[in-house]
Image: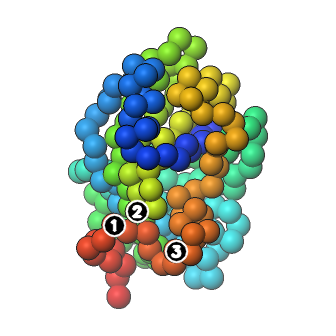
Amino acid sequence: MAIEYEVKLAGERAALLAALDRIGAAPVGERLLEDDLVLDRAGDELANSGRLLRLRRRGEEFLLTFKGPYEQGLGVKARPEVQTPVADGAAMRSLLEELGYRVALRYQKYRTLYRCPLSGCEGVALSLDETPIGDFLELEGDPEQIHRCAAALGFSRRAYETRSYLEIYRSRGGTGDMLFDGAADGRRR
């Protein structure tokens, strides 16, 4: 299982865009809504063990992702991850529900993907994430490259956020799903 290394950097959207512009980062794709369903068993079996099963819709694409418990390693969040494209999101959701999983919660963000053009940082995937709780740059890749890229963007390691968006949301008093205003509930009743 591959290990995902990442950090988030919080800021105002204009400042984050200016930082990306300073290093010459250009969008790799278009800005798309990511609508994520977190699935779990009764009693929150996966969440209680630090694991996550997620079905993500990004534009017209679907991804099924499993993440293992995370730890702080090399100054960044490190987490085992397996991810695969899914041809039919509705069928996959039905299959998982037949296996005893249910939608535990839903969260959304608008994401624009970038690549870090800096020498020695080419392996870092940058994401400008607009969430209901604010804007963030997410840096994912090799830990040393993440540190170099973050420094070039003007962020020190003290600015690193390693919690998930849902953890940040809850720490700010959020409950239930993390959705943009007017979003329909994705749970089956």
Mark 1 falls on what kind of element? loop
Residue 176's place in the image compared with 159, above or below, is below
Tell me which amino acid carries mark 1.
Phe
Q: Position of residue 119 (x, y in %)?
A: 53, 11
Mark 2 falls on what kind of element? loop
Residue 114's place in the image compared with 119, above or below, is below
Q: Earlier in the sequence, mark 2 or mark 3?
A: 2
Can residue 100 be seen from the camera position used here?
Answer: no
Within the image, what quadrant is residue 172 found in? bottom right
The circle on residue 132 is 2
The circle on residue 124 is none
Tell me which amino acid carries mark 3.
Gly
Q: Residue 100 or 156: which is nearer the viewer?
A: 156
Q: Residues within 10 Å of mark 1 (few under 14, many from 20)?
A: some
Image quadrant occupied by the C terminus: bottom left
Q: State if disc 1 and disc 2 touch (CB < 8 Å).
A: yes
Can residue 171 be seen from the camera position used here?
Answer: yes
Residue at 55% across, 43% down:
9
Residue at 51% across, 41% down:
138
Mark 1–mark 3 Cα distance, whole angstroms, equals 13 Å
Residue at 56% across, 23% down:
152
Residue 166's place in the image compared with 60, above or below, is below
Image quadrant occupied by the N terminus: top right
| Residue located beneath label 3 in the image | 174
Q: State if disc 3 and disc 1 touch (CB < 8 Å).
A: no
Residue 179's place in the image compared with 60, above or below, is below
Q: Is residue 150 left or right of residue 133?
A: right
Mark 3 falls on what kind of element? loop
| Residue located beneath label 1 in the image | 180
Mark 2–mark 1 Cα distance, whole angstroms, equals 6 Å
